[in-house]
């Protein structure tokens, strides 16, 4: 397993975590064993928004004696009246539900406390004016919530919370379909969503990725909006390559599904290569570097994707990006304009001109 550090904390988070949306389909024994197997494989990050209440007791047994070595993201607004998932913006209901979930899990705190599924501006207003955000800030001050955040599919809503300066982590839907404005949750243009990821990174806000496979649609040619299937490995690599992403949270049903997603860790580079998306992404992606490094190897040894990434982050206001760029062994000014990268770029990025632009920028 590989780990990425939460910028505003000491937590080292596994790059593959677990979503919870489908795990209820197994028996209680199977759920518990699947979670134990995940922990044994190095997974330490768990989303706690379930489709029904059944898995909570199973997770509690799997976490017993290991609570300090796992990280939980709990959702303020997800409720389970009658054992089935629902959501609310009623403060008293949220308080009661959160206390009940803590008790079920046998813990007295959550690592990440998220405003749950906030996709409408009216929801934002309710959260801010109805006491929910103040309640969560109070729990944060008391240490019951270690880090504040939210789950959302809307870049505009996420930016509202970034502006508070109080959040450390968000749960956001990232995959090639949504980033290229395809599918139910494909909110915002590719360029706007790309800016959002860079804004999160420059603000020190980590991203936990939900729906990396588009709810499974991307894995099947019949349901994929591109009429072509991608693999789990391609989708995971795509998400992990976005700025600010710390972990990807695929939903799994059992240990067989767990093995499929963990196979990413041992997959060769060619099986992770997602540059095939250039064949079916819309024209608004043309000319934009997505850091896929399909242009490699560079004859001069430039890491073209990383150079572009640090440049984009710096433009977005990340003051640390220049320091990272300065530490590169081979920088943009060593580009010999051979055209190798441009001939291989699936997005037709004019990298020769861009390397000149980047070199001039960082030499100022």
Image (tube, helix red, strand yellow):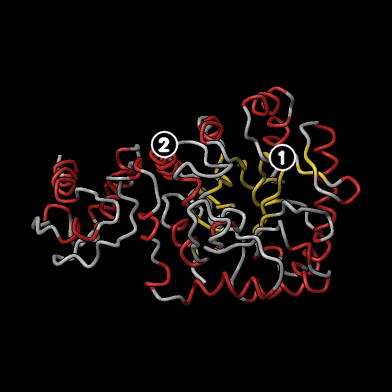
Q: Which one is in front, 27 or 108?
A: 27
Q: Which residue is painted at 70% across and 58% down in the image?
A: 20
**Mark 1 crowdedness (10 Å alpha carbons): few <14, some 14-19, many ≥20:** some
Residue 359 place in picture, x, y as percent? 15, 47
SS for dot 1:
helix
Tell me: residue 296, above or below residue 101.
below
Which residue position is annotated with label 1?
A: 139
| Disc ID at residue 237 | none
In the rendered image, which quarter is residue 189 located in? Answer: top left
Which residue position is annotated with label 2?
A: 192
Q: Which residue is painted at 70% across and 51% down in the image?
A: 110
Q: CA distance from mark 2 to mark 1?
A: 33 Å
In the rendered image, which quarter is residue 220 located in? Answer: bottom right
The first of marks 2 and 1 along the sequence is 1
SS for dot 2:
helix
**Mark 2 crowdedness (10 Å alpha carbons): few <14, some 14-19, many ≥20:** some
């Amino acid at each position: 397993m590989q780990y990425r550090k939460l910028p505003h904390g000491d937590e080292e988070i596994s790059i593959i975590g677990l979503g919870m949306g489908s795990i209820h389909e197994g028996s209680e024994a199977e759920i518990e064993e699947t979670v134990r197997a995940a922990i044994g494989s190095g997974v330490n990050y768990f989303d706690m928004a379930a489709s029904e209440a059944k898995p909570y007791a199973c997770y509690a047994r799997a976490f017993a004696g290991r609570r300090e070595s796992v990280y939980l993201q709990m959702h303020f607004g997800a409720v389970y009246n009658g054992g089935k998932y629902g959501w609310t913006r009623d403060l008293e209901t949220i308080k009661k539900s959160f206390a009940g979930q803590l008790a079920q899990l046998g813990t007295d705190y959550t690592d990440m406390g998220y405003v749950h599924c906030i996709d409408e501006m009216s929801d934002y207003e309710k959260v801010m004016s109805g006491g929910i955000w103040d309640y969560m800030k109070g729990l944060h001050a008391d240490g019951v919530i270690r880090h504040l955040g939210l789950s959302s599919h809307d870049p505009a809503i996420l930016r509202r919370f970034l502006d508070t300066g109080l959040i450390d982590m968000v749960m956001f839907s990232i995959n090639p379909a949504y980033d290229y404005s395809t599918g139910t949750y494909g909110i915002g243009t590719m360029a706007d969503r790309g800016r959002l990821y860079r804004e999160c990174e420059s603000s020190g806000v980590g991203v936990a990725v939900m729906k990396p496979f588009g709810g499974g649609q991307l894995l099947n040619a019949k349901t994929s909006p591109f009429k072509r299937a991608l693999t789990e490995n391609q989708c995971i690599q795509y998400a992990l390559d976005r700025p600010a992403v710390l972990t990807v949270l695929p939903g799994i049903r059992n240990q067989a599904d767990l093995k499929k997603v963990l196979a990413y860790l041992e997959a060769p580079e060619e099986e992770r290569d997602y540059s095939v998306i250039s064949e079916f992404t819309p024209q608004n992606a043309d000319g934009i570097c997505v850091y896929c490094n399909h242009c490699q190897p560079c004859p001069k040894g430039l890491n073209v994707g990383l150079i572009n990434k640090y440049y984009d982050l710096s433009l977005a206001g990340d003051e640390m990006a220049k320091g990272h760029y300065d530490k590169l062994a081979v920088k943009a000014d060593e580009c010999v304009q051979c055209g190798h990268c441009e001939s291989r770029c699936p997005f037709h990025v004019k990298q020769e001109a861009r390397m000149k632009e980047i070199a001039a920028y960082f030499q100022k």
